[in-house]
Image (spheres, rainbow, N blue to C red):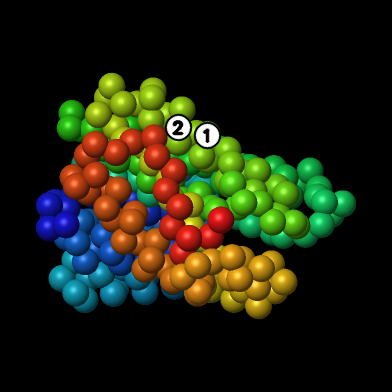
Amino acid sequence: MSKLTGKVVIVTGASKGIGAGIARAYGQAGATVVVNYATSKEGADKIVAEIVSKGGKAISVQADLSKAADISRLFAETKKAYGKLDVLVNNAAYYDFGPFDSVTAEGFHRHFDTNVLGPILATQEAVKLFGEEGGSIVNISSIVAIEPPPYTLVYSATKAAVDNITSTLSKELGPKKIRVNAILPGMTLTEGAARIGVAESEMGASMLARTPLGRHGQPEDIASVALFLGSPESKWITGETIRVSGGLR
C-alpha cells in the first residue's frame, strides 16, 4: 500500500464512523487526505490531527453533499491545495429509519439528495481532477441494498441506487481508466449507530444472528477494503459490489 504515497484522496463524511476509519487508513498508507465534513468541524479536525501526528498529510473541508454548490467548492478547494485527485470515496450519507407510513416528501428528498445525487455530482467533479492515469471511485453502499430489513424503506432504496450507479458508471468511465466499485457494509458499530441504538434493536439482533462471523463490524473492517479498492493492487477490478458484512446473507 506504500504505492499510495503522493496520491490524493477525498473521503466524504469523514468526521466520524466509517468515513473517519477510511480517512485514517489512507493517511497511514501515505496518501494525502481531504477529510470532508458537513457539520462536525471538531470531528474532522481531530481526524486530520491524527493523520498529521503520524507523519501524514491531511486537511479538512466543509461541504454538505446534498448541495451542488458545496460539492463544487469541495473539489475547488482540493484542486487549490493539491492540484489533482486520485481517489474519491463517496461515504457521506443520511439515514432515518421508521415505518412505511412515516415517510415524508421532505425525508425522501433529503435521503436521495445526499445518498444518490451527492455521489453523482461528486463523481462528476472528481473526473475533472483525475489525471491521464485515471482514478478510483469507491462508493459506500450498504448490505441493506440487497438485504433490506423493515423500517428502512427509503434508505435501502438509496443504497440500491448506489449499486446501480456503480455498475453504470464503471462502464461509462472505464475507457477513461476510472474504476468504480462499491462496498456493502453489514451492521457496523459507529457513533451514528450508537446514537439511534440500532445495534441493540430488534433489527440489529436479527442481523447479528444471521452473521456467520458472529459480530457486528468495526470501521476498520470497511476501511481496509476501501483502501484496497483505491490502490494499484485492485487495478483490474471495476463495477463490483463487494459485501463486507461478516457473511451476512
Image quadrant holding the N terminus, namely bottom left
For this rendering, which residue is in front, 53 or 240? 240
Which mark, residue 25? none
Q: Residue 128: x, y in percent?
A: 31, 30
Tell me which amino acid carries mark 2: Ser
For disc 1, the marked residue is 164
Q: At numbered mark 2, what does the secondary structure look like: helix, strand or loop?
A: helix
- What residue is shown at x 42% (from left), y 68% (from top)? 219
Q: Residue 61: x, y in percent?
A: 39, 56
- In which quadrant of the rendered view does residue 125 lie? top left
- In which quadrant of the rendered view does residue 56 lie? bottom left
For this rendering, which residue is in front, 66 or 241? 241
Badge 2 density bin: few <14, some 14–19, many ≥20, Cα 10 Å: some
Tell me which amino acid carries mark 1: Asn
Image quadrant holding the C terminus, namely bottom right
- What residue is shown at x 72% (from left), y 71% (from top)? 202
For disc 2, the marked residue is 167
- What residue is shown at x 27% (from left), y 48% (from top)? 230
Relative to 44, 54 lies left or right: left
- In the image, farthest residue toward the front: 212
Whether the residues at callouts 2 and 1 have beta carbons within 8 Å, the answer is yes
